């Protein structure tokens, strides 16, 4: 990537060589003019810059040192709409879930929250596609709306399309024979009528579905929607990400993303987010990333067989209760070995074993019966490390059912809190999950109730409005 070495000073319009250290994009002729321009430049001075490599494509690095909570970027989406695999009825105007199944846009007859929803006529929202939908006469299906929106941008040669087009779509990995291909053909079949007769629309639909799958972020608010952002989509994945983000509806009704630093970030550090679930095992996270983002994670957590000492994937050896860990966690076919005996399990044996356990856990968790959960947990801990994902999941349900005087309760809470704090040290992903455990622990005798509840409140401070996290925060505040 090339860097500019000179520009024009905004104060005197002269040739300028002095670069702003923050954004590296604004030039000044001299220090004095830079100082003079700062009140104006402050709001646009970005703390990030885009770099490019063959392995990562385009990515973001910090262009100056950042402190926790510093805003890194804030931008409105290039495009947004209902999630691709969603079967929910979402208003085409505002993205809110529809309460009634009979309210519709009076022109195109697609679902709406209210016939007077302001988003229906707004050109940044439904106004964009309504006239196209009237002509195309496609049976309304919310999960294809975003693809249609992007086709409108493409057909109208919108400036938004030019930015979207630059993002990765990985069509080469989404060819015939893949699930992605089948899903795309299903969407293509449904919206074929929308495509102009003189063009083979198949290629563009494949590109659009790739762009959505690889780049779109789930928004909240609105719930159930996804959005593509010009810069935020360049954040690379790490299982130990250094940013968090939330959403705010902007003045045009779109979900604006705000990305903040979770920790101190040094100038030149890569800026990262997490595109998968923090409480999934390394095998599950890496498989999901490879399948949906075509990306192989090599972060500190992924290369560590113990997952940073949490033992989220670790099994117990049936012979000697030793720890059974993958020999190479970055290899899906790796053998698993015991740390006490020469016993070996193949990758597929481990997968079968875990899949079977997961089925049992899902079934019993669904019932949420205290005694059944206690039984299940004791069965699991005979086979798995107590920090294993399945044990943590069951424990988390169980602590909410156990009375405060149960001798096991505090121990289970502490194990959960220790695990989530290691895997998500800044509460960017698991704040609600951890806060629930902190609150349960605070009821146990001998615990510092006030400290634990205050900690839970502080973890929940970033939760979106009206979310379960915010509701819990308000409840705990009233309890304190
Ligand atoms: Zn100047
Ligand atoms: Zn600057
Ligand atoms: Zn609406
Ligand atoms: Zn309409
Ligand atoms: Zn990783
Ligand atoms: Zn063993």
Image (cartoon, rainbow, N blue to C red):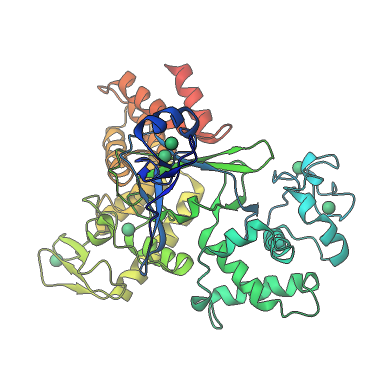
Vertical arrangement, residue 268 with respect to residue 33, above or below: below
Question: How far across and down, in percent of the image, does residue 365 sit?
Answer: 46, 50
The residue under the point 60% across, 49% down is 77
The residue under the point 73% across, 75% down is 189
Q: Quadrant of the C terminus?
A: top left
Question: How far across and down, in percent of the image, does residue 445 sit?
Answer: 28, 22
Front position in the image: 41 or 61: 41
The quarter holding residue 122 reads: top right
Q: In which quarter of the image is ligand 2?
A: top left
Left or right position of 147 against 283: right
The residue under the point 53% across, 35% down is 464
Vertical arrangement, residue 278 with respect to residue 317, above or below: above
Left or right position of 155 against 314: right
The quarter holding residue 352 reads: bottom left
The quarter holding residue 266 reads: top left
Any part of residue 86 in sight: no
The residue under the point 41% across, 48% down is 372
Vertical arrangement, residue 430 with respect to residue 293, above or below: above
Left or right position of 304 against 147: left
Question: How far across and down, in percent of the image, does residue 312 sit?
Answer: 29, 54
Q: Quadrant of the N terminus?
A: bottom left
């Amino acid at each position: 990537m090339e860097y500019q070495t000179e520009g024009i000073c905004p104060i005197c319009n002269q040739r300028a060589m002095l670069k702003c250290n923050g954004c590296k994009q604004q030039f000044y002729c001299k220090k004095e003019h830079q100082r003079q321009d700062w009140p104006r430049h402050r709001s646009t001075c970005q703390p990030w810059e885009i770099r490019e490599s063959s392995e990562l494509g385009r990515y973001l690095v910090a262009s100056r040192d950042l402190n926790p909570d510093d805003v890194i970027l804030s931008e409105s989406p290039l495009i947004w709409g209902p999630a691709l695999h969603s079967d929910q009825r979402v208003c085409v105007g505002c993205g809110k879930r529809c309460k009634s199944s009979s309210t519709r846009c009076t022109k195109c007859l697609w679902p709406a929250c209210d016939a007077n929803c302001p988003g229906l006529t707004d050109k940044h929202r439904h106004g964009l596609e309504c006239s196209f939908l009237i002509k195309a006469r496609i049976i309304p299906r919310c999960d294809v709306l975003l693809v249609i929106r992007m086709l409108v941008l493409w057909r109208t040669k919108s400036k938004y399309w030019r930015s979207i087009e630059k993002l990765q779509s990985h069509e080469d990995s989404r060819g015939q024979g893949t699930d992605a291909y089948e899903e795309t053909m299903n969407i293509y079949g449904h919206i074929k009528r929308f495509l102009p007769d003189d063009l083979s629309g198949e290629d563009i639909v494949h590109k659009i579905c790739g762009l959505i799958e690889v780049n779109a972020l789930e928004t909240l608010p609105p719930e159930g929607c996804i959005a593509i952002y010009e810069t935020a989509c360049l954040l690379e994945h790490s299982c130990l990400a250094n940013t968090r983000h939330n959403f705010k509806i902007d003045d045009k009704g779109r979900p604006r993303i705000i990305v903040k630093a979770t920790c101190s970030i040094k100038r030149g550090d890569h800026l990262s987010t997490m595109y998968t679930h923090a409480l999934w095992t390394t095998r599950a996270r890496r498989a999901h990333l490879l399948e949906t983002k075509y990306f192989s994670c090599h972060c500190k957590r992924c290369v560590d067989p113990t997952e940073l000492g949490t033992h989220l994937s670790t099994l117990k050896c049936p012979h000697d209760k030793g720890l059974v860990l993958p020999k190479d966690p970055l290899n899906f076919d790796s053998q698993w070995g015991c740390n006490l005996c020469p016993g070996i399990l193949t990758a597929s044996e481990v997968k079968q074993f875990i899949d079977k356990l997961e089925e049992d856990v899902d079934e019993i968790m669904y019932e949420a019966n205290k005694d059944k959960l206690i039984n299940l947990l004791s069965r699991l801990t005979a086979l798995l490390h107590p920090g294993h994902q399945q044990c943590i999941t069951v424990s988390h349900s169980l602590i909410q059912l156990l009375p405060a005087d149960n001798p096991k309760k505090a121990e289970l809470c502490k194990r959960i809190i220790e695990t989530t704090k290691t895997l998500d040290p800044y509460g960017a992903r698991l704040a609600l999950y951890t806060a629930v455990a902190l609150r349960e622990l605070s009821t146990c005798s001998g615990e510092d109730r006030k400290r634990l509840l205050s900690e839970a409140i502080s973890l929940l401070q970033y939760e979106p409005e009206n979310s379960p996290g915010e509701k819990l925060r308000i409840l705990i505040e009233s309890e304190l």
